[in-house]
Amino acid sequence: MDNQASTYSVKLYIYDLSKGLARQLSPMMLGKQLEGIWHTAIVVHGAEFFFGGQGIASCPPGGTLLGEPNAIVDLGNTEVNVDLFTEYLSSLGESTYRADNYQLFEHNCNSFSNEVAQFLTGRKIPSYITDLPSEVLSTPFGQALRPLIDSISITPPGNNAMNGYYGQR
């Protein structure tokens, strides 16, 4: 029997929720250029995992209503097998990433992707994604929109991760 550990590819799927509108409208509305309003997900073990208003969910890669990602970043490889990963997600889903903990700015899909990426590969997701909320909130328009933004929950349709798509390749 081979003692060498198996490795699994880990990818970050990046979607622009604004479909290009942020790039067009941000200079006028915020006084600064935003390239997009980012939703991210981690793709590993044959599925796409993300966090939204319904908690942690999964679907086939590229299988949300958002369609194909705007970009895919290769985060490297992990030795974390599907059983350990499922256990890890389950514990996150019962604690830090319960549906009622979702906040569009402070605790969202990108916070989840960043934490999971570090668990799997030791690497963070790109800072232009994780810095976006503070960039928006640093503007008068962002501050004025804060109450509305806090009430928004983004949930791309997918299966519930705890009984969902796991490992179906």
Image (cartoon, rainbow, N blue to C red):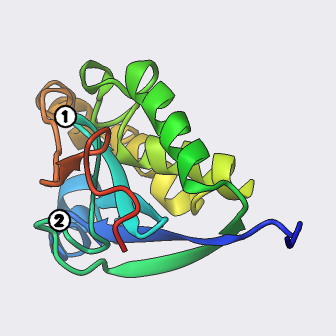
| Residue farthest right in this picture | 3
Q: Residue 38: image x %, image y %? A: 33, 60
Tell me which amino acid carries mark 1.
Gln
Q: Quadrant of the C terminus?
A: bottom left
Q: Residue 103: image x %, image y %? A: 29, 29
Quarter of the image for residue 52 reads top left
Tell me which amino acid carries mark 2.
Thr
Identify the residue at horizontal 37%, vertical 54% (top origin): 49
168 on left or right of 68: right
Nearer to me, 52 or 132: 52
Label 2: which residue?
Answer: 64
Identify the residue at horizontal 71%, vertical 70% (top origin): 7
2 and 1 marks in contact (CB < 8 Å): no
Nearer to me, 24 or 127: 127
Nearer to me, 33 or 120: 120
Q: Residue 80: image x %, image y %? A: 67, 54
Task: Give the structural element (helix, strand or loop) at label 2.
Answer: loop
Task: Give the structural element (helix, strand or loop) at label 1.
Answer: loop
Mark before the other along the chain sequence, 2 or 1? 1
Could you classify mark 2 by the number of other residues whose Cα lies within 10 Å: few (under 14), some (14-19), or many (20 or more)? some
Q: CA distance from mark 2 to mark 1?
A: 14 Å
* Above-or-below relation of 78 to 96: below
Could you classify mark 1 by the number of other residues whose Cα lies within 10 Å: few (under 14), some (14-19), or many (20 or more)? some
Label 1: which residue?
Answer: 54
* Residue 143 in view in this figure: yes
23 on left or right of 75: left
Q: Quadrant of the N terminus?
A: bottom right
Identify the residue at horizontal 16%, vertical 69% (top origin): 66
Q: Residue 70: image x %, image y %? A: 32, 80
* Above-or-below relation of 36 to 111: below
* Residue 123 in view in this figure: no
